[in-house]
Image (cartoon, rainbow, N blue to C red):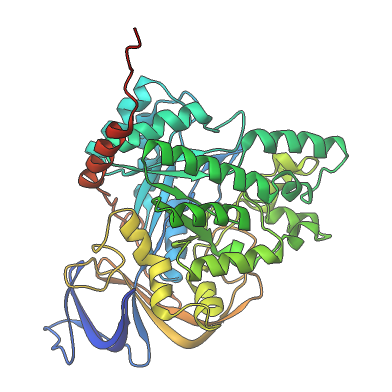
Amino acid sequence: MAILIRGGTVVTADHSFRADVLTQDDKIVAIGESLDAPGGAEIIDAGGAYVLPGGIDPHTHMELPFMGTVASEDFYSGTTAGMVGGTTMIIDFVIPSPKQDVMEAYRTWRGWAEKAAGDYSFHVAITWWDETVKEAMGTLTRDHGVNSFKHFMAYKGAIMADDEVLVNSFTRARELGAICTVHAENGELVFHLQQEILKHGITGPEGHPLSRPPEVEGEAANRAIRVAQVLDVPLYIVHNSCRESLQAITRARNEGQRVFGEVLAGHLLVNDEVYRHPDWDHAAAHVMSPPFRPKEHQEELWRGLQAGMLQTTATDHCCFCAPQKRMGHNNFTQIPNGTGGVEDRMHVLWHHGVNSGRLTMNEFVAITSTNAAKIFNIYPRKGSITIGADADIAIWDPEKERTISKDTHHQNVDFNIFEGMTVRGINTITISQGKVVYQDGDIRTEKGAGRYVDRPTFPSYYQALNRQHEAKTPVAVDRM
């Protein structure tokens, strides 16, 4: 099956140019002016539209078992919603329970993901440590295309990785050529503050941000960065929500440390006033970690994105409906953490980024697709409009408008954090694996069509790191 996209403006992370794009089967096979359509090809008129690489959301949690319930979005509904918004690939998370066999958890998540409509991959969380975990990390990188390992520095008593786990896992990741990622919040401090706030009789959603102030995030980000610095391992910090974590990343990058930062669309656009809403359900629907911050942090995050200190945008898409959120009706610490956004990320970032002048179109492509593909080593297969790349394409109408609402979105959740927001510039056609899967409201996704994407490690780079680290390791001196 061939598709000829005719008359559009191709927009990549590097430049923009008028060209036709021809796909054959699941690959891009030609880019140029006035291309001929092979017999039987589907022709798409992209005049006046932009032709972008399909979006990559590097941080989602489909059907996640968490806090006594399971996220309402599964891999089929979630990847379908992503396709509507122009996102053609997600990187989700395998999260083993404490002491659970890591490979068993990996196989479980792979089974759940078989229903995905779009391509996907996995980060694997390291939630505990022994020799079996060390061995599993090797198996995952060698045989299963995993090149990133996640560490939750929060959620004490559950999946929190303490410093011992960080040191062991970071060291093993360097040996294997994998990248470490962290959820940066000081879990001990969060737990302490939660108990103090409850003692003062604050049980509603307004207690959530009080228990997780920006300093809690900044301390953990700085600690993870320093551990990574000592151990010579690259670090990716997810969902930076505040000035303090951004400052830690900026300092490290200015010192030459290889640290990457991710920001959520929600943290750029939603502020902490939502937790003081008089409707409990409305406030609880916004409970996620890190929480939404005061407005001044949003402007700092936008500047970090513009300056290149934050490289990727994501959603942390983890949906819980109102009855699930009410599990914490009398105790905010029991409200399942998570919000949606996989369908809306690219739309709100175009509207508030490109239309406002904060971002160029090329920067938009970089932060929604290309940078994630590069950091997680799937570029140029993903995140590019180049010959030989996967035919994952979003066709973007810069003038068309859409008003976001839970009543019309395709995400399997009864709330939308961007409710009522009208955006100008939206995805109109999504091509995945060389097939039109969405066109102007017509959804054509297929359950199980998504492919697992291997992400190779970085052996040559890490071999150099290992040599540097060995050269810096102190040698014992005999002082007889």
> Where residue 145 appears, x then y in whole percent?
26, 44
405 above or below 116?
A: below
> Where residue 388 appears, x then y in whole percent?
17, 68
> Which image quarter holds the C terminus?
top left
> Where residue 156 appears, x then y in whole percent?
62, 31
> Which image quarter holds the N terminus?
bottom left
Q: Is residue 462 visible?
A: yes
| 58 relative position to 383: left or right | right
| 248 relative position to 432: left or right | right
Residue appearing at x 42%, y 56% in the figure: 58
**Number of marks drawn:** 0
**Residue at the far top in the pictured view:** 480
Q: Quadrant of residue 367?
A: bottom left
**Residue at the far front in the pictured view:** 480
Residue appearing at x 46%, y 77% in the figure: 441
293 above or below 440?
A: above
443 above or below 237?
A: below
Residue appearing at x 32%, y 60% in the figure: 373
Q: Is residue 242 visible?
A: no
Most foreground residue, 238 or 454: 238
Most foreground residue, 79 or 239: 239
> Where residue 188 appears, x then y in whole percent?
65, 33
